[in-house]
Image: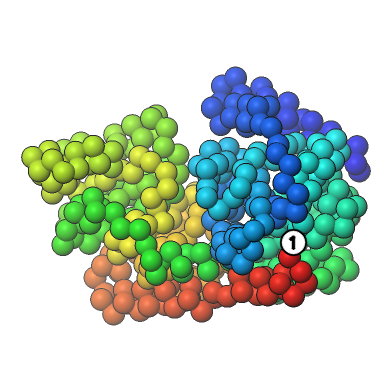
Amino acid sequence: MRLLYNTGVILYFVTVYLASFFSKKAKLWISGRKNQALIRSNGCVWFHFASLGEFEQGRPVLEEMRALYPAKKIVITFFSPSGYEIRKNTPLADAVYYLPLDTAKNARNFIEVLQPEMAIFTKYEYWYYYFRELHSHNIPLYIISGIFRPKQVFFKWYGVLHRKMLGFVSYFFVQDEGSKKLLKQIDITNVTVSGDTRFDRVWANAQHPKEIPIIAEFKGDSKIFIAGSTWPPDDQLIASLTPDHPDWKFIIAPHEINEEKISDLMLRLPADTTARYSQLANNEGDEKNGLNLTSAISNLVIDNIGMLSSLYQYGNIAYIGGGFGAGIHNTLEAAAFGLPVIFGPEYSKFNEAKALLNLQAGFSIGNAGELHGVVAKLTSNEAFYAEACYKAKTYVEQNTGATATIIQHIETHGA
């Protein structure tokens, strides 16, 4: 089994290496690991995140650890460039690295240099050699906001090595009872159902959002439909919606912001009423070019990263992208502001989406006709809309508290 695992890791590296000749992201994945130099950080707390989404998910625990133990060094690693490149200078860490490829040698060298006091992994990312090395040195390893499903390799007859990985974990903080039951089936009982730390993160953000004056100016007295983390199939649907709601303004924040994707999205929308956010930002303070442009447009394309979680404060209805691909993105950021959320059909892996659907605070659509129908109901039935807003916000608030559970355990068992 270990031979198959090692082969898989090598094949993954070769695939990324070949892709690096054509893909900027793959090139960063290779070059970032090649050029980094680790600094000894004795007794540090090591946080690992797969990417930016997991960073935001685990951020409440990271912030609490920083506040509780200011003298301890904190080291963060990312697997993906999309996390590393955006958060490599975060003040929450003393050092930020790419996680070296999971080999016995890399894991041994990494742990030897860092000498962490504990390791905290968010949601997923299970690496055999890193876990084994931590275990062999009696370094506590915590999984927070863990989620498990029957189809995962851990629960298959051929998942012997992966089950062994789980045996190296000191403690699991999982999102739901289903995950706890699955782990119990393979004799893992060091588990607490703490919930999902994302609720803590998005709720805190909604209480103290970062104001964006340009967006406030763009909004004016209009109602705003915000489409976040969209992909081309989502963009096509939103573009079909705009002509039917001339009294609304639309903000579209695509998941990828390279020039090709932004240009393609701009072409889907009326040129005379559409602008990029950078256009407004570059003209900020210029009454002739800035404010007039703001008042003249009704469709705004966000061409930067990092604004979306603050944008929702200006919205009235949200559409969350990804539901026509691998799966929807973060519905909770919008729900925390009391926005009804609409998303595509691929949501089965997301408990929060199912919960919002059951509350009629979330709505799944499969085509343009269904999207138009949901939006028509939300915009024409004030009582239905108000109830959806209330239920979305209340759902998020009632599910906070995972961070406190995790921190209490860590404090009790030493940090």
- Write down the residue under mark 1: 142
Residue 140 image position (x, y, % from top left): 80, 60
Its colouring scheme is rainbow
- Give the answer, above or below, for where 243 lies relative to 347: above
The foreground one among 132 and 238 is: 132
Asked where in the image residue 185 lies, by quadrant, the reply is bottom right
State whether residue 340 appears in this view: no
Q: Residue at x 82, y 43 (%)?
A: 112
Residue lying at 60% horizontally and 70% vertically, measured from the top left: 403
Q: How many neighbours does mark 1 have within 10 angstroms: few (below 14), some (14-19), or many (20 or more)? A: many
**Residue at image location 61% in from the left, 67% down from the top:** 68
- Callout 1: SS: strand
Q: Is residue 363 above or below residue 91?
A: below
Locate the C terminus by quadrant.
bottom right
Whether residue 209 is visible: yes
Q: Which one is in front, 250 or 242?
A: 250
Residue 176 picture quarter: bottom right
Nearest the eye: 275 or 405: 405
320 displayed left or right of 168: left
Q: Position of residue 75 (x, y in %)?
A: 66, 49
Q: Quadrant of the N terminus?
A: top right
Q: Nearer the viewer, residue 40 or 87?
A: 40
**Spot occupied by residue 48 in the image (x, y as percentages of width and height):** 67, 50
Instruction: Name the amino acid type tagged 1.
Output: Tyr
Question: In the rendered image of this protein, does residue 266 appear above or below residue 242?
Answer: above
The number of numbered badges drawn on the structure is: 1
Give the image location of residue 397, x and y in percent: 48, 76
**Extreme residue toward the left, this view:** 288
- Give the residue at the far top of this rendering: 21
Q: Residue at x 52, y 50 (%)?
A: 91
